Image (cartoon, rainbow, N blue to C red):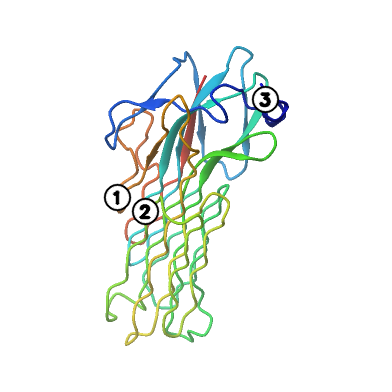
Amino acid sequence: MSPLLSRLGVAGGGGGFGFGRRRGGGANSEPSGPSFTSSQVFSYTGSPQSFTVPSNSSYVRVKSWGAGGGGALGTGGAGGMVDAYIPVIPGASLTVYVAGGGGNIGPGPNVPAASGGYGYGTGGSGGTLDGAGTNGSGGAGGGGSSAVINPQGTNVISAGGGGSGGQRWDSTGSGSPTNGGNSPGNSAGGAGQQVIAGGTGGSGSNQAGGGGGGGSGSTPAGPPGSGGNAGANTVPAPTPFGTNSGYNGSNTTAANNSDPDWSSGIGAGGEQYATGGNGKIVIYF
């Protein structure tokens, strides 16, 4: 094993990070590789968590769900999901970030913008009321990204957050807002578009792709705000062990929700005026 890989706290073999081979090639295929006897579930807490690699482990399997974007008049997009095997060094400490769902907003007018969800990549905040006077409406927040970071601070695996839904001045205004984007998307979730008499939704953090914030609402005669784009999954290149598995959601429907470790609401995009679903990480060892 090279000194560089040793310093990174990552096991050698096959070069770089090793990932299991997919069974088949469909949307719900899973990697195959070492079998495990134990697992640890990490849920959203709003702060970094840690996992210490057991003394007898040379690989761990990580399942990571990013958080969904918040809902406005338009619905939020679901976050991404990544499932992969990672070679590790026994005793190494991995930092785990489990994402929080993007904030929702209610019907306008005069609704403050919501914040983006917590994560390794924070979701973009909604467009503000700046310049909107008394007739504007803020935007919803994008979902954060869930990630596992090695001892040297390298992002090993992450699932991007979903974009938030677009907003309109109120439910009787003209035009239809767009829904939030699904991960995988851009490396950082793009901002919701600026609209008449309102601010532009914020971009998601570039740290593994938090979902972009939704555009703010407009005056009744103006166009509605656009939903934010989703952040991207971070999935390393294939190795001699095979390929990784990455998934994206569909509208508000969570990515890879047929997986036995998925829980109801995890990674789902926020329905109309509802908060996005939190992320989740499961580590097998």
Depicted 15 relative to depicted 197: above or below: above
Q: Residue 251: horizontal and vertical position, in percent?
A: 30, 54
Q: Which residue is mark 2?
A: 182
| Mark with earlier residue (1, 3) | 3
Q: Which residue is mark 1?
A: 250
Q: Which three-letter amino acid code belongs to the residue tagged 3?
A: Ala
**Nearest the camera: 284 or 35?**
35
Cα–Cα span, label 1 and label 3? 36 Å
Depicted 100 relative to depicted 27: above or below: below
Cα–Cα span, label 2 and label 3? 33 Å
Q: Residue 240: horizontal and vertical position, in percent?
A: 46, 25
Q: Secondary structure at mark 1?
A: loop
Q: Residue at x 47, y 13 (%)?
A: 37
In the picture, measured across the screen, residue 181 lies left or right of residue 279, that is: left
Q: Quadrant of residue 4?
A: top right
Crowd rating for badge 3 (residues with CA inside 10 Å; few <14, some 14–19, many 20+): some
Contact check, label 1 and label 3, Cβ < 8 Å: no
Contact check, label 1 and label 2, Cβ < 8 Å: yes
Q: Residue at x 52, y 67 (%)?
A: 202
Q: Which residue is mark 3?
A: 92
